[in-house]
Image (tube, rainbow, N blue to C red):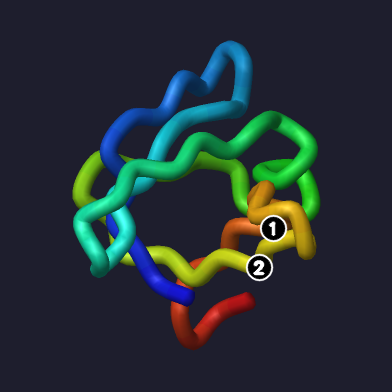
C-alpha cells in the first residue's frame, strides 16, 4: 500500500500519512524504526506494511526498502 507523509515528528519518530484512498493513517515509532530510515519529510511518498488489524507495521521508501 502507498501513501504520502502528512505529518512526522522527529522527536517521537511517529506521524500520519495520507493513503491514496484519501484516508489518514497514523504510524508509531516502532513502524518507523523498522524502516531503517533516519527521517521522513512532508509530502514524501512511502510504502507501508500493515498488520491484520490495520495498524502500520513498517514504513519504507519505494525502491529503497
In the rendering, which numbered label is found on residue 4? none
Residue 52: x percent and y percent?
A: 78, 63
Residue 13: x percent and y percent?
A: 60, 26
Neighbourhood count class around disc 2 (C-alpha, 10 Å): few under 14, some 14–19, many 20 upward? some
Residue 21: x percent and y percent?
A: 25, 66
The answer to whether the residue labelled 2 contacts the one labelled 1, judged by CB atoms less than 8 Å apart, is yes
User: Does 11 sit above or below residue 44?
Assistant: above
Q: Is residue 64 left or right of residue 32?
A: left
User: Does 63 sit above or below residue 58?
Assistant: below
Quadrant in the picture for residue 38: top right
Identify residue for label 2. 49
Q: Nearer the viewer, residue 35 or 18?
A: 18
Any part of residue 8 in sight: yes
Identify residue for label 1. 58
Mark 2 and mark 1: span between their CA atoms?
5 Å
The residue that appears at 47% across and 30% down in the rendered structure is 15
The residue that appears at 34% across and 63% down in the rendered structure is 3
Any part of residue 36 in sight: no
Residue 54: x percent and y percent?
A: 65, 55
Task: Determine the secondary structure under disc 1.
Answer: strand
Q: Is residue 22 left or right of residue 47?
A: left
Q: Nearer the viewer, residue 33 or 49?
A: 49
Q: Nearer the viewer, residue 16 or 64?
A: 16
Task: Determine the secondary structure under disc 2.
Answer: strand
Amino acid at each position: 500500500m502507498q501513501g504520502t507523509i502528512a505529518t512526522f515528528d522527529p522527536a517521537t519518530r511517529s506521524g500520519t500519512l495520507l493513503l491514496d484512498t484519501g484516508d489518514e493513517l497514523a504510524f508509531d515509532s516502532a513502524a518507523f524504526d523498522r524502516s531503517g530510515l533516519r527521517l521522513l519529510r512532508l509530502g514524501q511518498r512511502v510504502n507501508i506494511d500493515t498488520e491484520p488489524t490495520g495498524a502500520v507495521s513498517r514504513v519504507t521508501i519505494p525502491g529503497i526498502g
